[in-house]
Amino acid sequence: MPQKTLRFKIHQDGRVEETVEGFIGNSCNEATKNLEDALGKVTVKNKSSDAFISNQNENLKQLKNESNVTF
């Protein structure tokens, strides 16, 4: 499992730039939600390539729950 890292850069004008690494799919949103809520309004979100990778285990669980096919 890759290391998960949150980095914050606070600019002189008060903007906070957050970089998230090591999360797959939308799990980064769950990991940062409370921090983003506490910091204030999010104006821009740029997704890295990791955000577009799906977790195969989660996909298989979802398929298993939604179908009558046994894996």
Image (spheres, grey):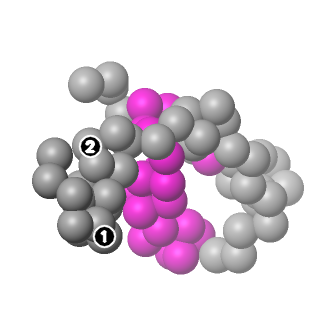
Magenta stretch, residue numbers: 18-39
How far is mark 1 from mark 2, CA to CA? 14 Å
Name the residue type under label 2. Answer: Asn
The local crowd at label 2, few if under 14, some if 14 to 19, many if 20 or more residues have their Cα within 10 Å, is few
State the image coordinates of residue 11 (x, y, percent, origin top left): 77, 46
In this view, which residue lies farthest toward the left? 70
Identify the residue shown where x is 16% and y is 46%: 71
Measured from the top left, where is residue 41 in percent x and y? Answer: 71, 75
Q: Find residue 59 and report its horizontal and vertical position in percent.
A: 35, 50
Residue designated by label 1? 66
**Depth check: 25 or 18 in front?**
25
Asked if the magenta segment contains residue 55, the reply would be: no
Pick the residue in front: 65 or 5: 65
Q: How many numbered callouts?
A: 2
Most extreme residue toward the top is 2
Provide the secondary structure element on which disc 2 rests: helix
| Foreground pick, 4 / 50 | 50
Which quadrant is home to the N terminus?
A: top left
In this rendered view, identify the residue nearer to me: 49 or 8. Answer: 49
46 vs 62, left or right, is right
Crowdedness near tag 1: few (<14), some (14–19) or many (≥20) residues, C-alpha within 10 Å: few
Q: What residue type is labelled 1?
A: Glu
Residue 57 got which mark?
Answer: 2
Which numbered mark, 1 or 2, is in the foreground of this view? Answer: 1
Q: What element carries label 1?
A: helix
Q: Quadrant of residue 51?
A: top right
Q: Which residue is drawn at 26% across and 43% down?
A: 57
